[in-house]
Amino acid sequence: MTTSGTRVSAIAGSLAAAVCLSGAPAAAQLNITTYHYDNNRTGWNSSETALTQSNVSNSSFGLLQTVTLDDQVDAQPLIVNNETINGGQHNVVYVATENNSVYAIDAQSGQILLQTNLGTPVSWPLGCGNNGPNVGINGTPVIDTSAGVMYVIAYTLQSSTPAYYLHALSLTTLTDTTAPVLVSASGALKNGQAYQFNATNQRQRPGLLLSNGTIYAGFGSFCDFAANDSRGWVLGWQESTLTPLASNKLNNTKTKSPDDFFLTSVWMSGYGLAANSTGSVYFVTGNSDYSGTTYNRKTNIAESAAEMSGDLSTPLGLFTPTDHGQLDEYDNDFGSGGLLLLPPQSGKYPDIASAAGKDGNLYLLDADILKKEFGSYQIGGCWCGPSYFQGSDGVGRIVTSGNNSVEVWALHGEKAPGLTQKSAFNGIAGAQDPGFLTTVSSNGTTAGTDIVWAVGRPTDNYPAYVTLYAVNPDNGNELFSETAGAWPNTGGNSNIVPVVDNGLVYVASDQMLTIFGLGGSAKADLPKVHHVDRRAPLPPGEHEIYAFLRDMKGSAITAQERDGKMVRIDASTARRMSHFAEPAIGHALIARGTFDKSGLLVADAILHAKDHPVMWPSDR
């Protein structure tokens, strides 16, 4: 463990003193055992008594500790209080990294109590750069405190072949409580042909779900590569035995598509699958064939919010935007964002769902009959997911995070629900894909205690720091902001979820966990970012360029490089190899291949790049 050079020497004492001076009661203890705190995915800790709008500021709140980790963290930290571990009782924060390491860390001092590794991670899967160089534990694990077990899926190399394993780890020892289970599945295509789960082509990114004794996980693709083979899955296992469910959900069962492109992934920028009180499972899907012609309610539920029975045997609901064909055609995934289930509301429609995607339309839906839409609201491009809390007026609020804005919307309407914007803060930094993730803390509905927390994405490729923000949702004013970590692998979005518990705020990023609280340093003194080009090596004679797409006719592409020079690209090989993520006019791409004598780049891979050139590493 390393600590900030300006750390407070006695964290517990400083926190207690700060709370005492503020007149606030001692912080309540809430176990945070799943993505966004609960199966509704509200992201709301309503038991936070130490942090208020009046004491969270750059003069009274700041960095307490920095803990060194072994790799990038895409999973949200989880917290269990009063855990007997390593010979003592601790509040424990559990952090999982892309190196397949799981840490148990004292939630106040930052001391690493235990660490385990679940196997060699997969390096640069399929050559995809929409991640760090390693993909190990990507989706947020889930904890059952009554069983004392954390469930986690690790992506490992087994005899040079990628494989997923579901683990049940003891919270007190980080050892397997039962033998890990190889993730496998079989589905039936429309013509009756069996289709097998292929771990090489599938990415497990959404947070895991534990509901009614069943563990669920969603799967998508790597960079839309191998789209001829990769399809979206939702799989489940019995918690007690890790036995797979008899049924699973294969989202695309078509046998043909115009461009041999299937997908319909479940990825949701890492947002967790949701479940209601009866055990129904909710998720959102992404794009399918870029012809825009393959959607079907029974055989290909692309660009849709879906509800499944808990045993995954029966579709219970589906909402698909009317412009789904255009979403497919322009790679504007609805499934770039997650689905929030609101707690029961008053009025005719107590069960409400909300979700938004790349095009920025936030849909308000009937969670009992998903096809029923109450309205849509433009929030800006959303590689993100909403949060929820109840204001001091007793009215429910949805927090959105499209583009660079925190927006707070109040629910209204007894007969037909709707939203009214109450506040907005437009200053969240970020130059990757639009959006970010939020959480909310409050002391119930006590006025002046509700705070929205957010972590912006990096604004450049070096040093690629990320920033923690606290925002007053009543008026949209910034309460606090400070550097909170680093994200040097800028080709993949930092889908960081800030976690708030017991008067402390946790941010897990690349190779570090930072802990903020009252009495902390006003200026974060983080370890220096060691900027190393960690991209996968290119074969001899191959080049990689970053550019904006200006024209595309079939496989003939014209793109504009960072210096303004136009380059011609032949993407026919990339298409044939299924290493082709359909680019869009005006948006950025990465092309890998060799130049012929005429200067034509014969590409064997086309990927999406960030639309901000400051995110681009050097051509090579």
Image: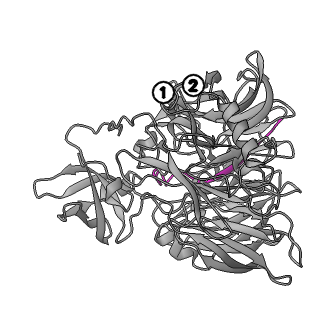
Inspect the image, locate mark 1, and give the three-letter code of the amino acid beneath it. Answer: Ser
> Considering the image in quadrants, where does the N terminus appear?
top right
Residue 160's disc number:
1
Q: Position of residue 46 (x, y in %)?
A: 79, 54
**Residue found at the very far front of the displayed protein:** 21
Up-down: is 439 above or below 178?
Answer: below
Give the crowd class for mark 1: few <14, some 14-19, many >=20 residues within 10 Å. few
Region of the chain picked out in magenta, as a range: 221-239
Give the crowd class for mark 2: few <14, some 14-19, many >=20 residues within 10 Å. some
Q: Residue at x 67, y 52 (%)?
A: 55
Q: Nearer the viewer, residue 12 or 255?
A: 12
Instruction: Name the residue tied to disc 2.
Output: 119
Up-down: is 289 above or below 202?
Answer: below
Report the side of 548 relative to 197 (left or right).
Answer: left
Q: Position of residue 304 (x, y in %)?
A: 65, 67
Q: Nearer the viewer, residue 467 or 601?
A: 467
Q: Main secondary structure of the magenta part?
A: loop
Q: Position of residue 549 (x, y in %)?
A: 31, 67
Inspect the image, locate mark 2, and give the three-letter code of the amino acid beneath it. Answer: Gly
